[in-house]
Amino acid sequence: MRNARTRVLAGLAVLAMIGAACASNSTTSAQGTGGASSGLCASIDTSGTDALARVCSSGKLRIATDPKYAPQSSFDVTTSTWKGFDVDVADELAARLGVQPELQAQKWGVITAGSWNDRWDVSVGSMTDTLDREKLFYFTPAYYYTPAAMSVHQDNTTITGPGDLTGKTVCVGVSTTYQDYVEGDLKLGAGAPSFDFQIHGANLQTYDTDTDALDNLALGDGVRCDAAISAQQTIQAYIDDGGKIKLVGDALYYEPLSIAFDKNDPSDSQSLSDAVSKIVDDMHADGTLSSLSKKWYNGVDWTVTSASKGSVSASPSA
């Protein structure tokens, strides 16, 4: 089981080590710094001032993601390596551009605040396209989908669905759609499946990331949280890792997850967003995203909306 106290003590060490390790642990064969000679960048005029030209000229793609969001993205301090579905997607994007992926550990609240000030080029971190976020970011087409799920401590027998959460404390990651859902403010982007707000009168407690919320739920039934909400895949991974929690009820809503680019990027990120959007479409068409989903999610293809059906108490068939 993950231990919240241990992770807090290790947090500074994690962030310090990631900066040195992220550029050297890629599994791709992309080019190093100094310009790209393969992939899409081989055909790009690097004398331009837009973000795509700058990335191709530098030979690297700076990627912000969460180091504590398994199985999407996590950083192993002992081996100084990244792993996860989002990590593999990021590596593949960089390879198809023809540049080196440079993963950066960033807090989710910082990423979703926008105005990145040229600290990184892209967020490959399972970000949901919402109407509020569209004011800050360009989004690619969805690269996979996830059901938002409820979890309770394994000893709890009284909470079986969202209707049981009135007056209860619900723990979530800060600046997530799960926070927006509990607060009744969630507005998904165009084309997203419709949903109803089913939680009313709950007390909200936020943490830096979803796994911190799950850690606090696992401390005991009602000790810090009565329930926690996250992606079904994240909750299931936590359970598989020995976390003393369980999934309950049906999916609250379904999220199309996209890759994001800062609209306030001083180099104009529209061109880079368009290029990566085409790569995402290609990765859907050639089966790469499907294969990566099955690799990380126990054989389930979450890249198609047909996978996002039914109860969250068990994974759907592939």
Image (cartoon, helix red, strand yellow):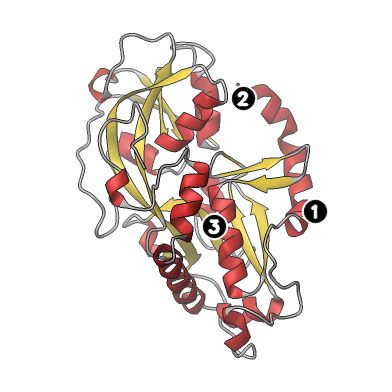
Provide the secondary structure element on which disc 3 rests: helix
Sort mark 2 into few (<14), some (14-19) or many (20+) by Cα contacts within 10 Å: some
Task: Specify whether residue 206 is in view.
Answer: no
Q: Which mark is residue 89?
A: 3
Q: Give, as a three-letter code, the residue at label 3.
A: Val
Quadrant where the C terminus lies? top left
The label number, if any, that marks residue 2 in the structure image: 2
Q: What is the distance, in whole Å, between disc 1 and disc 3 at their CAs?
A: 21 Å
Task: Tell me which numbered mark, 2 or 1, is placed earlier along the sequence.
Answer: 2
Q: Earlier in the sequence, mark 3 or mark 2?
A: 2
Percent position (x, y) of residue 97? 59, 74
Dot 2: element = loop
| Residue beneath the point at 34% across and 40% down | 147
Crowd rating for badge 3 (residues with CA inside 10 Å; few <14, some 14–19, many 20+): many
* Residue situated in front as seen by the camera: 97 or 180: 97
For label 1, the crowd category at 10 Å Cα-Cα, with few meaning under 14, some 14 to 19 and many 20 or more, is few
Q: Is residue 122 left or right of residue 29?
A: left
**Marks 2 and 1, Cα distance to the nearest angstrom?**
25 Å
Estimate the x, y position of residue 133 in percent, counting from the top left: 39, 57
User: Of the residues shown, which amino acid type is indicated by label 1?
Assistant: Ala
Q: Residue 311: x, y in percent?
A: 28, 30
Instruction: Please name which of the two marks, 3 or 2, marks the residue nearer to the observer.
Output: 3
Asked if disc 1 and disc 3 are in contact, CB closer than 8 Å, the reply is no
Query: Quick one: label 1 or label 3, which is nearer the N terminus?
Result: 1
Q: Amino acid at mark 2?
A: Arg
Q: Is residue 246 visible?
A: yes
The N terminus sits in image quarter = top right
How far is the residue under mark 3 from the one under mark 2? 25 Å
* Residue 41 coordinates in the image, percent (x, y): 60, 81
Residue bearing mark 1: 20
**Residue at image x 52%, y 43%?**
296
Quadrant of the rendered image containing residue 121: bottom right
